[in-house]
Image: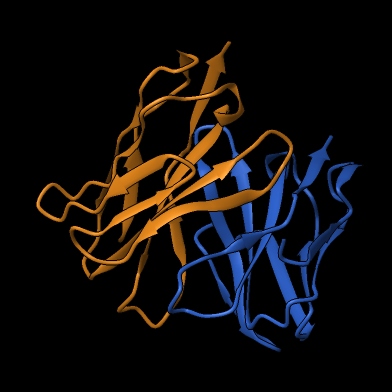
Amino acid sequence: DAGITQSPRHKVTETGTPVTLRCHQTENHRYMYWYRQDPGHGLRLIHYSYGVKDTDKGEVSDGYSVSRSKTEDFLLTLESATSSQTSVYFCAISPSLRTGELFFGEGSRLTVL
Amino acid sequence: GDSVTQMEGPVTLSEEAFLTINCTYTATGYPSLFWYVQYPGEGLQLLLKATKADDKGSNKGFEATYRKETTSFHLEKGSVQVSDSAVYFCALSDRNSNDYKLSFGAGTTVTVRA
């Protein structure tokens, strides 16, 4: 199994508070992604990274920011959490654009009250 | 933009039944196509893939053929087991794009009863 660790795995927070989710990989893969999973929507890309300090927006990036200061860590931050950001967040990594294969973490369930 | 449409679930089957999950796509380039599976409480994992027209991907008894003429990539298994209960996602990536992103369908929940 690909070495991907997400933390925290579960979090309950209140509206308006900042939240940071961490994705840590031990595979030295170049590409890292944050997706959210919601019923009826499948997986939607929030942000992705194609190298240290190189990031770009996905289709649902509003209200989220990311940082990647090291190859192994990709942080997702909700500056001021809202109830609409209640979701399961998945980190994924990939070694190459050519293979098209992503390796996923186990997910972080976030509840915003 | 590129997109994937897959049949809505949930799908409930008995053991040893035949499973088909339909997936169609829209893409401007030359996509690679994937099926991912998510078992309860886990992240997604790649089940199979096909990178060009007429390719057949297969794994764990599942098969899917890349049909360019019908823009489809339907997933099939001839005899399902209880352990196949999961959520299945169809996905595509545009190999000619400089931005590597996978577009996922909404997912189909499959429950297999003993």
Q: Residue at x 35, y 37 (%)?
A: B6
- Identify the image quadrant of residue A10: top right
Along the line of sight, the residue nearer the viewer: A68 or B88: B88
| Lateral position of residue B56 relative to residue B93, left or right | left
Query: In the figure, residue A66 lies in which quadrant?
Result: bottom right
Q: Residue at x 30, y 79 (%)?
A: B96
Note whether A68 is above or below B66 in the view shown: below
The residue shown at (18%, 51%) is B67
* A45 sits to left or right of A64: left
Residue B11 image position (x, y, % from top left): 45, 19
Camera-side residue: B50 or A70? B50
The colour with which the image depicts chain B is orange
- In the image, residue B75 sits, relative to residue B8, either above or below, namely below
Q: Quadrant of the N terminus of chain A?
A: bottom right
Looking at the image, residue B61 sits to the left or right of residue B72; the answer is: right
Can you say whether A58 is above or below B23 in the image? below
Residue that protrudes farthest toward the left in the picture: B69
Q: Quadrant of the C terminus of chain A?
A: top right
**Is the residue B46 above or below the residue B21 in the image?**
below
Task: Please give the count of numbered marks on the rendered protein.
Answer: 0
Observer-nearest of A56 and B89: B89
B53 on left or right of A109: left
Residue B74, x across and y down, in percent:
29, 40
For the point 72% across and 56% down, which residue is it?
A: A105
Q: How is this picture coloured?
A: by chain
Question: Chain A colour?
Answer: blue
Q: What percent of the width, then of the height, locates residue B26?
A: 24, 54
